[in-house]
Amino acid sequence: MLNIDLHCHSNVSDGVLSPADVVARAAANGVHALALTDHDDVTGIAAARAAADAAGMTLIPGVEISVSWGGQTVHILGLRIDPAHPGLVAGLHGIRLGRIERAQRMAADLARSGIHGAYDGAFAYAANKEMVGRTHFARWLVAQGHAPDLRTTFKRYLTRGNPGYVEHEWTSLENAVGWIRASGGMAVIAHPGRYAFNARELHLLLDAFRALGGAGIEVISGSHHPSEYGKFADLARAFGLKASRGADFHAPDEGSDIGCLPALPHYCRPVWQDWPELAIHLSPSMA
Ligand code: AMP
Ligand code: MN
Ligand code: MN
Ligand code: MN
C-alpha cells in the first residue's frame, strides 16, 4: 500500500526543517508521495522537488492558504498546484504582506500585557522573512520563558481572548479556491475538525466550498483525534467530496510525524485517485 502524506510545513512557513530536510525525513519514514504545503508561500517547492527526485519520491506541489469564512480562519490546501502561476503567486504575496502588518498588531497587543520585543523576537524565528505567523511568536514566547511549550503558549497567548491575539481578515474562500483551480490544482479543506463551527455551519462551509469547485476534505489529519476520523469520512461521502491524509508535520518534537498516521477508511475516495504521477510506485519495476 502506498504511504501518501499531503500536508506538511518547512521553514519557508512555520516548520523548522528546510524543504530538503522535510523530504529526507519523509523518505526515511517510507513515504512514497509527499505534498509540501507551506502557509501562504510556495517558494520551498523547487528545493523539495529536487530532493524528492534524488530520493525517488514523488513531490506534490502544494500550499495551505489562510481564509476568513463565517467569522473563523479556515485553511484551504491546494494540491498539484503550479507554483509559478501568476494569479496564485500574486494572491499569496498579498496574504504575506497582511501577515507583516498583523505581526505588528500582535506585538503591540503583547506589549500591552507587558511582553516587549515580540516583533523582532518572532522574526528571529522566521527563516523566511516574508512569512511570519503565530508559531514564530509562540517559539519566541517559549524561549523567553513565558510558557513551557507551544501547546501551553497557544492556551495562554495568541488565541482569541488572550494576549497577542488580533482579528485579521485573510483572503476569501472564493479567492483561495479560485487561485488553486486556476493554477491547475485541487482544493481541499484542511483539518475540518479544528474549526469552532457547529454542524450547521460546517455543512454550509462544505456546500459553499463544493459550489466553488472544491474537491476534498482532510479526513486523516494530525489535527484530528482518531475518534473523529469516521465522522469526517462520512461527511466527505455525504457531500460528494474526496478524502485526504496528512500529518500537518511542523517539527520533529511537535505533533504528528510525516507518513505515520493510519490509512484512509476503505470507503473513502482518495484525493489522489486519478493522479498519474503515482503510477510509478505501483509498477512491478519498482519492486
Ligand atoms: P497563523 O497562520 O499565523 O495564524 O498560525 C497558525 C499556526 O499556528 C498553525 O498552522 C499551527 O502551526 C499553529 N497553531 C495554532 N494553534 C495551535 C495550537 N493550539 N498548538 C500548537 N500550534 C498551533
Ligand atoms: Mn502551521
Ligand atoms: Mn492549518
Ligand atoms: Mn498546516
Image (cartoon, rainbow, N blue to C red):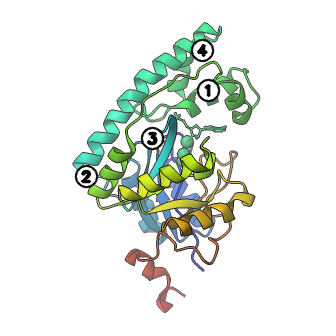
Q: Earlier in the sequence, mark 2 or mark 4?
A: 2
Residue 273 % position (x, y): 46, 76
Give, as a three-letter code, the residue at label 4.
Leu
Would you say residue 19 is visible in this rendering? no
Up the image or down, 239 lies above or below 141; here it is below
Going from N to C along the chain, the mark reached first, 4 or 3, is 3
x and y percentages locating residue 140 in the rendered image: 62, 25
Provide the residue designation for mark 4. Answer: 110
Left/right placement of residue 233 relative to residue 10 reads: right
Q: What residue did someone put label 3 on?
A: 66
Residue type at the position of mark 2: His
Q: 248 or 125: which is nearer to us?
A: 248
Q: Residue furthest left?
A: 86
In the drawing, does residue 155 fall left or right of residue 60? right
**Mark pair 4, 3: CA separation:** 22 Å
**Ligand 2 position by quadrant:** top right
* Callout 4: SS: helix
| Closer mark to the observer between disc 3 and disc 2 | 3
- Report which quarter residue 135 is drawn in: top right
**Any mark on residue 160, and which?**
1
For label 3, the SS is: strand
Ligand 1 within 8 Å of the CB at mark 3? yes
Mark closest to the chain's N terminus, 1 or 2: 2
User: Which disc, if any, is residue 85?
Assistant: 2
User: What whole-number distance in Å separates the C-alpha atoms at marks 1 and 4?
Assistant: 13 Å
Residue drawn at x 48%, y 50% as measured from the top left: 205
Disc 1 is placed on an element classified as: loop
